[in-house]
Image (tube, rainbow, N blue to C red):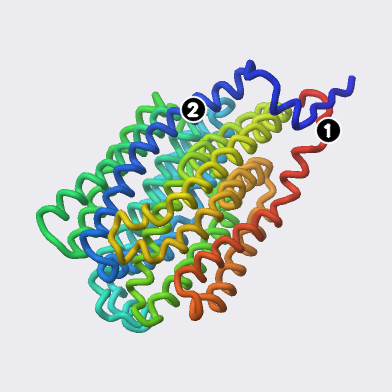
Amino acid sequence: MVRVTRPWTALTRPLRDTTLRTALRGGSWALVGTFVGRVAHVGALLLAARHLGSEQFGGMSLALSTALVVTSVSALGLPVAAQKLVAEAREIDVVRRDRLIDITLGMTASVGLLTMIGGALSSAWVADVILDRPDVAPLVAVASIFILTTPMVEILAGLLAALERFGAVGLFRAVHGSLCGVLLVIVLLSTSGAMAALWALAAAEALACVIGLRLVTSARGPRSTARYGRTELLIEVRSLLRVSLPALIASVSLQPALWLGQVLLSRQPDGLQHVGIFAVAMRWHAIALFVPATMGSVLLPMLGRLRATGRSMDARVLFVRYGALTLAFSTAACLGLIAFAAPLMGLQGAEYSLASGVLVVLAVATVPAALNNVLSQRALAEGRLALWVWSDLALATTLAALAVALVPALNGSGLASAYLAAYVVSCLVLLPIALAARSPARGQA
């Protein structure tokens, strides 16, 4: 018998099925923890923006952005690959699950450590030659610590999500954000300067990594006693690289494009002030995205598990409902940011409130950015890696091209407009994923 389920029927059906209840319950725990961590972390950064002023905060943001460009390479795309493959193996192959976890942690630590050392040693050259800002060289050197810690934080959160320990994900995100916020506030109250603020953030991330490792060890339970040799390790490394390399291409294309826009901003008259203002607006944009982004973090491991266990219909219904919830949350956040853009920017000082137009543009970008996240999660779960990579390449190309064209004339508003247009283009590339969700489904896979 052919069974046809229309998207509207799937969306409006009462929430009786275990799959959606599990997803929403997991998303709720992750949401609460992320909310606590995000408020503490971003709140402290906004306080730092007010305390340091737009120029010092701009230098700090430029150093962090430079480190994130390197991080996009040093992470090797492993957070995405590990989350997908561990989720698929969780119920059907515990031995493989443990191998994947061990290999992922080892690769992240070793590559991150070596790249961090290289980043610190080359910080003076990067600041002088690439950024054309020799004065930020000490900040770039300290920010190189994040080349190791940031990928590890994302790996640990991804592994907890892959194990479907969403409560632990929420706890880890809350602890990470709270540590960053508390240490940053303590440092700002006791001393001044962007250098001290960066050291506080680095120390907080290192402590969070230790706690996250304990949570992953507890979540995985008793380890498998099966031994595995070099052959098994090479097989799992290859399986990780098959997913991580497309993820690496996607991340390497996106982060440098945003960094390029900030470098262009820094080279305009009063450049570091423009970078600081844009960074503050991006923090508020990140706050608006945290609900759909956090809910979406539950989507990939659950879609992967459902497909691996032959429940394709449940995976499709889950995607449709999550997509509708994401659209609702992101639209509400967009309207709220637009309505309160001026007072929100003004919280950091008068110099920020004059540029509330930057936040208005980024508020509109909340909707396509949130939808892009959900569409990308489904593309990854279904193994449509080429489409996902092309969407991120389109995003990066559009962002970089429009930043070059718009930033000299419009400063921060130009970069925000390029960011908005880039996410719209990326969603258009991923449109086949949304259209596939509307196709009639035949039977229960």
Q: In this view, does 169 lie to the left or right of 2?
A: left
Give the residue at the far left of this rendering.
190
Q: In this view, does 190 lie to the left or right of 405?
A: left
Q: SS for tag 1?
A: loop
Does label 1 or label 2 sit earlier along the sequence?
2
How many marks on residues?
Answer: 2
> What residue does disc 1 label?
440
> Does 193 sit above or below residue 320?
below
Residue 102 in percent (x, y) is at 42, 41
Question: Residue 395 is drawn in which quadrant?
Answer: bottom right
Query: Which residue is at the front of the view, 355 or 188?
Result: 355
Q: Residue at x 18, y 60 (%)?
A: 196
Q: Quadrant of the C terminus?
A: top right
Query: Which residue is at the front of the view, 275 or 74?
Result: 275
Q: Which residue is drawn at 16% across and 55% down?
A: 188
Q: SS for tag 2?
A: helix
> Does 414 sit above or below residue 444?
below
Residue 174 in percent (x, y) is at 33, 37
Give the residue type at disc 1.
Pro
Q: Residue at x 29, y 43 (%)?
A: 40
Q: In which quarter of the image is the N terminus?
A: top right
Q: Is residue 127 left or right of residue 410?
A: left
Tag of residue 26? 2
> Does 25 sit above or below residue 388?
above
Query: Which residue is at the front of the view, 344 or 219?
Result: 344
Q: Residue at x 63, y 38 (%)?
A: 323
